[in-house]
Structure formats: C-alpha cells, structure tokens
Amino acid sequence: MDNETILQLLEWLDASTCNFLAVKTITSELDKAGFAALNPSEGWDIKPGGKYYVVKNGSAVFAFVAGTASPAEAGFRLVAAHSDSPCFKIKPNAEILGDGGVVALNVEKYGGGILYTWFDRPLSISGRVMVDSGDPLNPETRLFDLRRPVATIPHLAIHFNRSVNEGNPLSVQKDMKPVIGYFSREEVMDTAKKGGFVKVMIAESLGIEPTDIIDYEANLYPFEKAGVCGVNDEYMQSARIDDLSMAFAGLRAMLDTCDKPCAATRVLAVFDNEETGSGTKQGAASPVLRNMLDRIVTLYGGEADAFYRSIARSFMISADDAHAWHPNYGEKYDPTNHPVIGGGPVVKINSNCKYMTDAESSAIFRNICRVADVQCQYFVNHSDVAGGSTLGNILTSQIDIKGVDMGNAIWAMHSARETAGTSDHVETVKVFTTFFTL
Ligand code: ZN
C-alpha cells in the first residue's frame, strides 16, 4: 500500500461530508498549489502555463492549467468526476415531535442509496446556509459541518417483524426518519420560536443566530471515519467513495503535474448532481463545462473556428466507480468481463452507449495505462442486466468530445459505507498523472 496517497485520500474523504465540502476540500488544495480562483462574473486574465479554477454553485469545480500552446493547436485533456453521493436531505420545517419529547427529522432521499445501510449508525449533518449579506439578490453562503454524531435512524426490532431477513420494503417517509434526541416541552417551544432544532444546531456550529439563517441545504452523513481493512490493508472503506475517490485521484494527479509545462490545457472537472441525472446548472447535462472551455479558447484568440478545432483535438477520461466482482454473487456479473478489486482501473463498455467508451477511446486509455505501467480491466454488464449510466454520455450531449468511461472497482456502490481497493486508487492516480504529462 502506498501509505501517503491512501492516507491523504482518507483524510480528504472525511473532510468532504457533502458536495459543498468536497468542493471546498478541492479548492483549498488548489489554493495551496497556487491556482487562482476565477470569478465567472468578471473578466479572466489567462496566461499560458497559468493555474486557475472556477466554482459553480459551490458544489462543482473546474480546475485547469492553461496549455503552453493554444487549445486549438493542442486541445484539452480532461478528467471528469462528480462531487455528490446518495444521502438524505433535511426538509424545511423538519422537526416532528413524538412521545416523550422525542424529535425526529423529516428527510427526503437524494439519489439512489441502499437505504438499510443507514440504520443504527451515528449520523451527523453538513451543508450550506444562506445568510443576509445586505444585498437581497446575493445572500452570503456559509458552509457548516456539525462534526458530531447528532442523529441516528433506529431500525424496528426483529420481534415486530420476524420476516425482516426475507426482504423488507422501506418507505423513506416512514422508516428513514432520523431521531435527534428527547427534549422537555419548554425546550421544544423555545427552539420552535428560534426556527427549530436544525437551524439552532447549525447556527451554534457557525456562531450565528438561528434567525440569521434565511435558508439551508443540509444532509445527513455517516459519522464513522474512512479507514482501511483486509489482512494486508488491501481494502478501504468510507462513505462517498463513489465518486470522490475518482475526483481526488484527479486532484492528486493535477497537483502533482501542474508545474510541469504541457502544450495541452489540462482540466479537472468535478460536476454535481450526477446521482440525480446531472440536470442542474452545475451538472454534466448543462453547458457549464462547454461554456468554460469556450471561454478559455476565446481568450487564447485565434480563428473563429478555434473552439471546434480545440474539441476535435481533445480527450476526456470520465471517471466514475465501477462494480467489482462480488464473491457472494458471481451470477450477477458478466462471465468473462468482471473487474476485481486490486485488478487496476476499469474501462466501462456498453453496446447501447450508456458509456462513451468505443474501441478508439478504449485503445487510447489502454495505451495511457501501458505508458504508466498499470494493468487495467474491463467492465461489461451481464447481458440480462440493464446497469447504470454515468457522466460521459451525458456530457457528449453538450460537447462532441472523444473520451472513455472508466472507474475503480468497488463493492456496495451507494451503500452508506462502500469498499474499494487501496492499490487500485494508487494505480489510477498514476494513470491520470501520465495522461496529464504525456
Ligand atoms: Zn458515481
């Protein structure tokens, strides 16, 4: 195990308990490495070799190192991933009072998580609040993370449902409400006057008044820290491995290569809302990336067709985790193409084009792996299973760019605690680093 790379990944995963904090983790590292933040509402001054990033909605980030040649001559080299993971979002007016002063929270599911993995765990809350800035059209954003276990979703005892282990349908509205404690009538009344327990807890963590909070986006997250397991530390476990492990592999590669001159413009694109179909202004189905690339090309000057020439010379690695062969469910997998944990990065292939991979882009990726001296493997669905989709083919509806869909093989995708391979992460960092320096 490459200790340093893995320990850093685990630390980044723990710091990134929601999409907003994932972007903050990335931008803090970019700041340290000398990247300049560009404001979309102001003019950009881009110099060849310069390091920049743009944040969208606080939940998507696009970092780039301007090429020593113009994109029209040398193209873009992109690694794309996503910042969001399935979780529970806390609704407004969330508090539901029960017997004995018990307070539960009204929540909505975000994305397609494995619900029962969220039971009986210590949970915390993070997200963003909007506070008054004096300008009604531009409220101020404050990020928060309670960083203490304030909630749990208790499962019903087996004695009330003896057949629980034979399948147990779950309702988000009924079964998944987290409980945050029990309180006296006075405490409940007093807190209600201040805006409710959620606002009071968040305000306390930020050192502001609950009434300062105009609105919030808050999500539950599993409080346990990321860690390694397995006899030889071959596995790592955490919430949000999909897809922060890929975002952070891209970040590591970008930080390690950003000071080496390269003719191509290197881009790390971390979108939000992949888990809900990418259909937001900060998602891959929006023009956000296309607009940014267009803007960079324009600032290099050149002919009117420079943008189209740039895209024709570009290559994208769409990086999102893949399903590892599971020893208890071998029948679910394709008989000859089932990636294993520890087998290296995975090229994803789908004949119905749910992935952007084709023979040409797969060959390019395999060539990069060969140069990096890294083994790679294929994922193809069992022919009777529909499978999932990811960023690549959604992005191609906005930009007709050549690219490959890949990821690392993980178990329990969308569980509250997913499992991946430590060596695979190190190998993928190597591949991305090679891609950014070829
Ligand atoms: Zn994903």
Image (tube, rainbow, N blue to C red):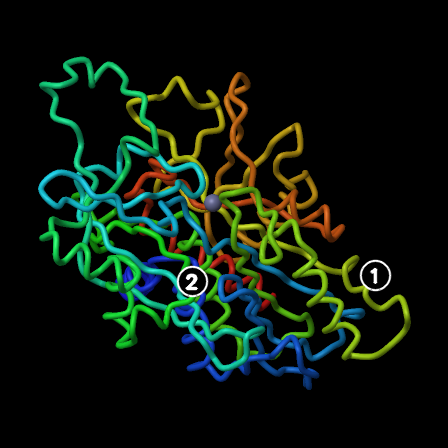
Q: Does the image show residue 232?
A: no
Using the image as rendered, state which of residue 194 and residue 405 is in the foreground: 194
Q: Which mark is residue 215?
A: 2
In the displayed structure image, the side of residue 27 where residue 392 appears, left or right: right
Task: Please state which amino acid type lies under the numbered disc 1.
Answer: Tyr
Quadrant for residue 267, please give it.
bottom right
Q: Is residue 209 above or below residue 393?
A: below
Residue for point 39% across, 17% down: 331
In the displayed structure image, the side of residue 342 where residue 436 appears, left or right: right
Task: Please state which amino acid type lies under the numbered disc 2.
Answer: Asp
Q: Secondary structure at mark 1?
A: helix
Q: Is residue 165 above or below residue 369?
A: above
Using the image as rendered, state which of residue 434 and residue 107 is in the foreground: 107
Quadrant for residue 96, please give it.
top left
In the rendered image, residue 128, in percent from the top left (x then y), is placed at 40, 64
Quadrant location of the C terminus?
Answer: bottom right
Is label 2 within 8 A of ligand 1 (CB to nearest ligand atom)? no
Q: Which mark is residue 308?
A: 1
